[in-house]
Image (cartoon, rainbow, N blue to C red):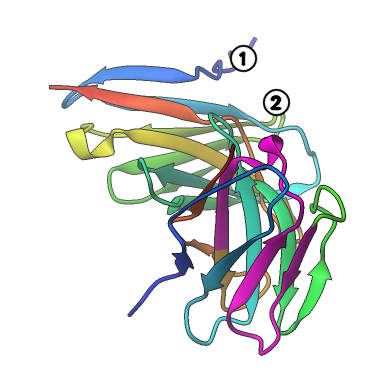
Amino acid sequence: GESVGLHLPTLSVQEGDNSIINCAYSNSASDYFIWYKQESGKGPQFIIDIRSNMDKRQGQRVTVLLNKTVKHLSLQIAATQPGDSAVYFCAEKGAGDYKLSFGAGTTVTVRA
Amino acid sequence: GAGVSQTPSNKVTEKGKYVELRCDPISGHTALYWYRQSLGQGPEFLIYFQGTGAADDSGLPNDRFFAVRPEGSVSTLKIQRTERGDSAVYLCASSDRPSGEQFFGPGTRLTVL
């Protein structure tokens, strides 16, 4: 069977390694998903988004994977850097909707 | 250009007091949103403005919370008779259209003693 990544509240990663952050969503009607990065004392910052008609999208050093069958989303960060240390949130919204529903965050700590 | 700004950055008040939190959206953004973020959790939707009107206030927890946006730009979130459970970071976001990317401000950290 297909494995589904577990959501972990914290992730410690060695600088230079790849990071994978997982998120499960509950609303089957959601058709737009976003990953946000939030540093201490700041608001969430957009990283990358994906629509439900896609299963993969790549940005600069980041890749988002969407598995609608099991309602799972992941964010992969390549060659993790100290500046990547933050809390990462996935968010979703439905077609034509405007309000975001955020998942539980994952705190990523990059070890030098 | 300037992003979303929020004032004050920190607000400490006593239980039962009234507070106002201000949001200045990105210039020209017609959609404005308020979210509340409790410690260790993701933001939760409170209210959405399209222009001057509150299009959706379903996230406001009770009638002690109210928000206005009289000229379709700056918005003020008002909390009456504050309670300790209101302590949180209040985030504002704006977008150039309802389905557009939401840009968040730094938030106002409210502490109710």
Task: Provide residue A77's location: percent of width, then percent of height.
Answer: 32, 35
Q: Which residue is mark 2?
A: A70
**In terms of secondary structure, where does tag 2 sit?**
loop
- Please state the horizontal and vertical placement of residue B4, each as a whole percent of the image: 45, 70
The chain letter for the residue carrying disc 1 is A
Residue type highlighted by circle 2: Val
Q: Is residue B54 left or right of residue B25?
A: right
Whole-percent x, y for residue A52 in the image: 66, 49
At horizontal 48% and vertical 85% (from top left) the residue drawn is B27
Task: Name the one closer to the observer, B92 or A85.
Answer: B92
The image quadrant where one finds the N terminus of chain A is: top right
**Quadrant showing the C terminus of chain A:** top left
Q: Is residue B87 above or below residue A107?
A: below
| Vertical arrangement, residue B7 with respect to residue A30, above or below | below
- Mark 1 sits on what residue? A2
Q: Residue at x 35, y 35 (%)?
A: A86
Does B70 appear in magenta?
yes
Disc 1 to disc 2: CB gap under 8 Å: yes
Q: Are marks 1 and 2 on the same chain?
A: yes
Q: Is residue A56 visible?
A: yes
Q: Callout 1: 10 Å neighbours few (<14), some, many (20+)?
A: few
Q: Is residue A8 above or below residue B38?
A: above
Q: Which residues are magenta?
A: B65-92
Q: Is residue A59 above or below residue B56?
A: above
User: Which chain is indicated by disc 2?
Assistant: A
Residue A83, quarter of picture = top left
Say which residue appears at 51% left-offset and 75% top-offset: B24
Q: Secondary structure at mark 1?
A: loop
